[in-house]
Amino acid sequence: MYIKRITADNDDIDVKAFASLKGILLTAGSDAAAIALYDSLTVTGTDKFSIKAATGTSFFVPIPSDFGQNFKTGVSVDITGTSAVAYLYFE
């Protein structure tokens, strides 16, 4: 299991090709937060996975092991919200 902490937009996250996303935890700060993940080296194209969290809350999305979300090119992230933090769980 590999856990990546995200606090700002991030291109080409250092995970091996064909990484499988198993879950994501998004915590919003003083305003609502959103995160979108792209199967690319930069935040381009259509997002592959996205979630939102209301102000001052956390939202966890588990992805069952049989249905992990695979990324073949790379993993890039667009995160919004003041003091937003996300944890990505890869296998």
Image (cartoon, rainbow, N blue to C red):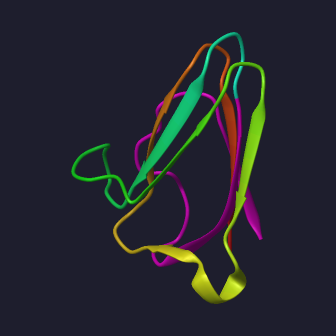
In the rendered image of this protein, does residue 26 appear above or below residue 83?
below
Viewer-side residue, 59 vs 45: 59
User: Up-down: is 66 above or below 44?
Assistant: below
Relative horizontal placement of residue 50, taking residue 85 as reference (left or right): left
The structure residue drawn at horizontal position 67% and vertical position 39%, both measured from the top left corner, is 86
Residue plotted at (56% across, 19% down): 81
| The furthest residue to the front | 54
Q: Is residue 54 left or right of residue 39?
A: right
Compared with 36, 33 (above or below) is above
Quadrant in which the N terminus appears:
bottom right
Q: On the rendered structure, is 33 left or right of 73?
A: right
Q: Is residue 75 magenta?
A: no
**Horizontal arrangement in the rendering, residue 1 relative to residue 80 (left or right):** right
- The residue positioned 69% from the left and 62% from the top of the image is 23
Q: Nearer the viewer, residue 90 or 32?
A: 32
Residue at 65% from the left image edge and 24% from the top image edge: 84
Q: On screen, 13 above or below 56?
A: below
Q: Which residues are magenta?
A: 1-27
